[in-house]
């Protein structure tokens, strides 16, 4: 049973990635990174004691990042979801939605939510 | 108006030797480009038909703008919907339906009893125009071997302006022959049904796109089509490329609204929208739709105006032809800035001529000259360059969504200018209207200088890397 980290192209994504590695180490399992970014992820700074797989979004079915992450949870039977969160303005949320908020509410497994700058 | 050309790594393919299949490929290309021709013809035919139509149907400046622009609003919808439909049901199926819609829409326009019915019919035609703009370049790119891909898609762009030119010429002939007839405008619109019939009949014999077939898991059929339009060895080898390109296309559909939360992506999309909107705010299409009337306002007689109007079509064709040769030899930013500087200059000159020149026999010719030069430089720089940039700046994964959004905004800007032009000219006159265009051109120059990135000489990966780092 692995840990899944939802990693968007933002500081919250970096926070989720690092927290995901720590959580996977704590639970003695591997980390599956669902990259929500449109450019390749840089994993060079991460420690290599935890096994990390990266899955990228591909195709119209993965257009909705929430669906993409939830699909991976279902596919791989993960035990924990790690997400990065930040305060969003009401306008920002209305226009662009909040992926983290939806994942928090819809995840079938327990969610670890970290803010930037937290371990 | 071209879609992006998929930039793929080509496995070494055997060269495409000429043979029976080359002729077939040639026929396919000709028939498909009738889609572009219809696009041009249907958008250009209103120019020249408007004056008699106005008299016959009792149009005001407002309803005139409405009747003209509603086709473009239809095209905005058609481009969005058409792209999706061609992904679901296939390119050939889509083009066939578009041909039928062109025929039905044209006949509905020709026999409209009131301007309301005409407006609705033009909306239907607009759906077909938009759908064609989204589907035909894709079909051409997918059916052509990569060596010919660029030139065939370019040929489509030339067909579009040629369609407009043809509409201007045919309208001039019809008007000078039967202009005294109240319903001459119906004859003018009716001519457009001929290329639509050619497209319909022609497409019945055309193959489906091999790449689309492959994406539908119909590989045997895909190979069958390839064997029709390539040499046998090349057909087999190309299947691998077809798969790769189909995969790439799938990837291009990944990104959506949620990705706009990423600052550098949002910036790119806003730049794309800005490019399209400023392209339309040059007012190029006001001239392509209202040219004849612009010239009568300037002082020409109706017959002379419709003849002079054909020069706009000619200037477009010449401009685009030269742009094709020049485009990859000059930096994009330089060409855009130069283009806008020239168009703004000519806008100013038209405005000044309209205000300062005394009414004389010479004045209409001065205005004609400046507007023709405006059209030439516009179609020689900004026109095709904006489409090229839109195809180049977006990362693969968001390309489908981003281009769809930018093209939609571009059509809406096109339609808005078309809608507002007649009331504006009626309210403040040609001079002031062109001063407004000049002002918009100045804004465009500032926008391009500050925001538009250079793409020439970089691979997409290099550009994406640099840009995303800079604006993360």
Image: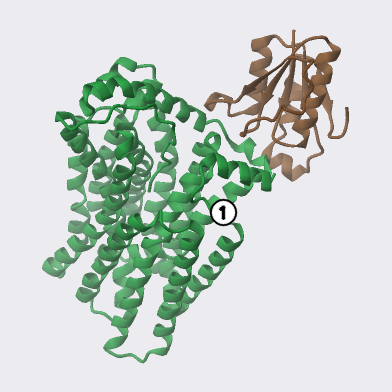
The residue at the point 78 percent across, 22 percent down is A82
Q: In this figure, what is the number of numbered marks? A: 1
Q: Which residue lies furthest to the right in this view?
A: A118
The residue at the point 47 percent across, 29 percent down is B248
* Residue B69 % position (x, y): 40, 57
Is residue B5 positioned above or below B293 on the image? above
The residue at the point 75 percent across, 29 percent down is A100
**Drawn colour of chain B?**
green
Q: Is residue B112 visible?
A: no
Element under label 1? Answer: loop
* Residue A103 % position (x, y): 73, 24
Q: Which residue lies furthest to the left in this view?
A: B177
* B416 or B436: nearer the viewer: B436
**Drawn colour of chain A?**
brown
Pointer 1 residue: B453
* Residue B133 % position (x, y): 36, 44
Is residue B317 positioned above or below B272 on the image? below
In the rendered view, does A79 fall on the left or right side of B445? Answer: right
Q: Can residue A41 be seen in this view?
A: yes
* B321 or A63: nearer the viewer: B321
Residue B324 falls in image quadrant: bottom left
How was this image coloured? by chain
The residue at the point 51 percent across, 29 percent down is B251
In the rendered view, does A47 fall on the left or right side of B362? Answer: right
* B291 or B165: nearer the viewer: B165
Subunit of label 1: B
User: Quarter holding the C terminus of chain B?
Assistant: top right
Residue A116 falls in image quadrant: top right
* Residue B301 % position (x, y): 23, 79
Label 1 packing within 10 angstroms: few (<14), some (14-19), many (20+)? some
């Amino acid at each position: 049973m692995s840990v899944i980290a939802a990693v968007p192209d933002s500081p919250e994504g970096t926070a989720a990635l690092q927290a995901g590695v720590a959580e996977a180490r704590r639970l003695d399992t591997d980390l599956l990174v669902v990259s929500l970014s449109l450019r390749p992820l840089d994993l060079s700074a991460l420690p290599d004691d935890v096994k990390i797989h990266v899955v990228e979004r591909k195709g119209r079915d993965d257009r909705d990042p929430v669906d993409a992450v939830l699909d991976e949870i279902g596919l791989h039977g993960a035990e924990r979801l790690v997400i990065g969160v930040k305060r969003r303005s009401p306008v920002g949320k209305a226009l662009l939605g909040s992926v983290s908020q939806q994942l928090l509410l819809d995840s079938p497994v327990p969610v670890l939510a970290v803010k930037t700058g937290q371990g | 108006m071209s879609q992006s050309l998929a930039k793929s790594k080509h496995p070494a393919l055997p060269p495409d030797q000429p043979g029976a299949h080359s002729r077939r490929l040639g026929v396919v290309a000709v028939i498909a480009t009738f889609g572009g021709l219809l696009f041009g013809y249907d958008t250009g035919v209103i120019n020249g038909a408007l004056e008699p139509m106005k008299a016959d149907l009792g149009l005001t400046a407002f309803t005139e703008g409405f009747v003209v622009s509603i086709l473009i609003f239809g095209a905005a919808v058609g481009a969005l919907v058409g792209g999706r439909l061609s992904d679901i049901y296939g390119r050939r199926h889509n083009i066939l339906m578009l041909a039928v819609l062109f025929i039905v829409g044209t006949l509905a326009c020709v026999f409209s009893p009131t301007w309301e019915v005409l407006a609705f019919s033009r909306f239907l035609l607009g759906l077909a125009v938009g759908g064609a703009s989204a589907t035909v370049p894709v079909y051409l790119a997918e059916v052509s071997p990569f060596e010919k891909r660029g030139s065939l898609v370019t040929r489509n762009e030339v067909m579009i302006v040629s369609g407009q030119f043809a509409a201007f010429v045919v309208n001039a002939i019809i008007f000078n022959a039967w202009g005294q007839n109240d319903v001459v405008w119906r004859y003018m619109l009716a001519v457009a049904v001929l290329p639509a019939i050619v497209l319909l009949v022609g497409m019945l014999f055309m193959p489906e796109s091999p790449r689309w077939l492959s994406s539908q898991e119909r590989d045997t059929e895909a190979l069958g089509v390839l064997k029709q339009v390539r040499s046998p060895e090349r057909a087999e080898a190309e299947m691998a490329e077809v798969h790769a390109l189909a995969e790439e296309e799938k990837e291009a559909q990944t990104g959506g609204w949620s990705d706009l939360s990423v600052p550098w992506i949002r910036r790119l999309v806003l730049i794309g929208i800005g490019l399209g909107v400023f392209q339309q705010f040059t007012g190029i299409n006001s001239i392509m739709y209202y040219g004849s009337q612009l010239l009568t306002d300037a002082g020409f007689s109706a017959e002379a105006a419709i003849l002079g109007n054909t020069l706009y079509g000619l200037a477009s064709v010449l401009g685009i032809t030269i742009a094709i040769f020049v485009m990859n030899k000059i930096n994009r930013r330089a060409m855009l800035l130069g283009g806008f500087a020239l168009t703004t200059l000519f806008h100013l000159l038209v405005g000044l001529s309209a205000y300062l020149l005394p009414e004389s026999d010479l004045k209409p010719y001065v205005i004609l000259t400046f507007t023709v030069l405006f059209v030439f430089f516009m179609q020689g720089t900004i026109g095709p360059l904006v489409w090229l940039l839109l195809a180049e700046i977006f990362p693969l994964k968001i390309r489908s969504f981003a281009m769809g959004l930018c093209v939609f905004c571009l059509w809406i800007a096109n339609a808005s200018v078309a809608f507002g032009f007649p009331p504006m000219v009626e309210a403040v006159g040609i001079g002031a209207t062109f001063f407004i265009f000049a002002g918009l051109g100045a804004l465009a120059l500032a926008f391009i200088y500050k925001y538009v990135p250079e793409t020439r000489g970089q691979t997409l990966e290099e550009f994406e890397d640099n840009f995303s780092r800079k604006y993360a």
